[in-house]
Amino acid sequence: MTTKFEQLPNELILICFSYFDFYELCNLFFGLNQRFNQLIQYQTKMHINLSSIPSGKFFTFFFHLHRFMTTTQNYPLSIIANDTCELNVILQDDLFKEKFSKLKSLTLTNIDVEAIYPIIFEKKAELYNSLERLTLLEMDCTADGGRFAIE
């Protein structure tokens, strides 16, 4: 007996969905069928990795994300950022200040320390009210060209 992915119970599909960030999840599964759309819209825990979004699609994705969050009331639980400019664009924008004020986790890699304070304590997003976890990573290069993170 062969089981297709579509035949799995919602709980197992949601576990599979949890391995993708929201951009990848939408690109891969949204629009395939009504059931997947419903799971993504209302039951998926949203995690956004800004580096997975191609620069040419960045603003388009966030326009669609804003519409999605307004319609479904499903808000991101975590954001991973490697670029201060991209992070500021979404956290400082009036469209998102209310939606990202529910953010639970923020992971920043190679973000200048001086840029962190306004991101967390700025009045627009008010992340200091909801943020439960802040991870600061610094990527270092080794002599052999390898990279490792320092937390």
Image: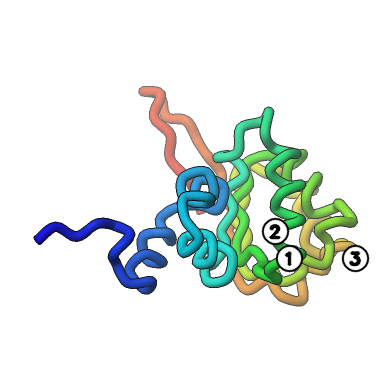
* Quadrant (top left/top right/bottom left/bottom right) for the N terminus: bottom left
Residue in front for this viewpoint, 10 or 107: 10
- Which residue lies at the image location 29% right of the left edge and 66% below the top edge? 8
Kindly identify the amino acid type of the residue bearing the numbered disc 3. Lys
How far across and how far down the image is residue 118, in percent? 84, 56
- Dot label at residue 68: 2
Which of disc 3 and disc 2 is earlier in sequence?
2
How far across and how far down the image is residue 135, in percent? 58, 59
Is the C-beta separation of discs 2 and 1 under 8 Å?
Answer: yes
Is the C-beta separation of discs 3 and 1 under 8 Å?
Answer: no
Q: CA distance from mark 3 to mark 1?
A: 25 Å
- Name the residue carrying label 1: 71
Q: Is residue 134 visible?
A: no
- Name the residue carrying label 3: 123
- Name the mark nearer the viewer: 3 or 1: 1
Please give left or right for residue 47 compared with residue 103 in the image. left
Please give left or right for residue 61 compared with residue 97 in the image. left
